[in-house]
Image (cartoon, rainbow, N blue to C red):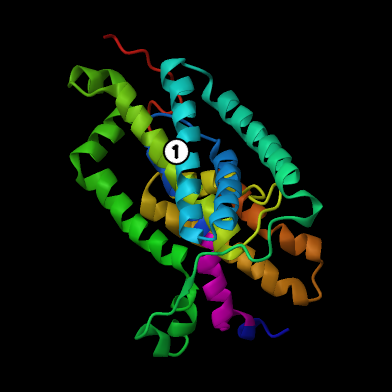
Amino acid sequence: MNILSIFTNPYLWASTIAMAVPLALPAIGGTFSERAGVVNISMEGIMLISAFVSVAFSAYFHNAWLGLLAGVISGILVAYVFAWAAAKMYANQIVLGMAFNIFASGITAYLFNAIYGPEGTPFDTPKLPDVRIPVIDRIPVIGQILSGQNVMVYIMFVLIILSQWFLFKTTIGLRLRAVGENPEAAETAGIDVVKMKYLGVILGGAFSALGGAYLSIGVLNSFSPEMSSGRGYIALAAMIFGKWTPVGSFLASLLFGFATALSYTLQESSISKNIIMMLPYVVTILALIGIGGKSVAPAADGIPYRPKK
């Protein structure tokens, strides 16, 4: 296989963007949560629950947009419970996140088998549409990369811009970041610390749910147990690698998306398939050990805070 032909193939770069979506969305969501001082590793579980709820509602109502809405609502509800346990009950956030992930894995597998059985989700389940952009569509190479993607790709780009603006250019974003850095000072300044933590975690749940819905009714129109395949954890690495910013998280997700897309492309080569499939996880490990620069988390990230009021 010609190496040059691999890297000049528009399909590789189009796939890179598509593969980045279910990583970038929960990574940005994790940024909101951790900027508010709450470590939320339940993104994996929220993605799984949303993926199942999205495809179930899409199949039942024959409407993918209703499926997407239901998936996001499910993510918000799960995140609300997580926020309550973390901010109100002062539970250990790492243990709590793992418990949510195990619960999500079990409940989605059970419901999938109970409702759909061995035949799986209906083959005619609607999926979110792909969108062709009229002007860009005619541009050689660029049109092949940017046009014809699933609608969630374009929603992701809009959300990246809005998230960066919200977090760093608005008063609420400033308060959210203040809570994650120094909750005592934030409370002294009149900021409701608990409310900000709820906001951060719930935003994280909504974004993670979008990532899960993309897997089941964006890429596919079906659900399978454990279909998130560790993407929630990779998204966590992307968030750290991106230095807890929406744009940085997206760029890191592109790197992981490229590793995944490249692994699929290289399956036709003589390299062992098992080694190729390790690529995304190798990149994740390199990111977590600090390749690409030191990442400093918000000062109060993961530390339970008991308001003085």
- Is 193 left or right of 301, judged from the image as shown? left
Residue 135 x, y percent position in the rendering: 34, 86
Q: Nearer the viewer, residue 265 or 120?
A: 120
* Above or below: residue 232 compared with residue 13: above
Q: Residue at x 58, y 75 (%)?
A: 12
Q: Residue at x 67, y 36 (%)?
A: 107
**Secondary element at image label 1:** helix
* Above or below: residue 293 compared with residue 14: above
Q: Is residue 15 visible?
A: yes
Q: Is residue 234 visible?
A: no
Q: Residue at x 48, y 47 (%)?
A: 70
Q: Is residue 17 magenta?
A: yes
| Mark 1, residue position | 76
Q: Residue at x 30, y 23 (%)?
A: 193
The stretch of residues the image draws in magenta is 6-20
**Quadrant placement of the N terminus:** bottom right
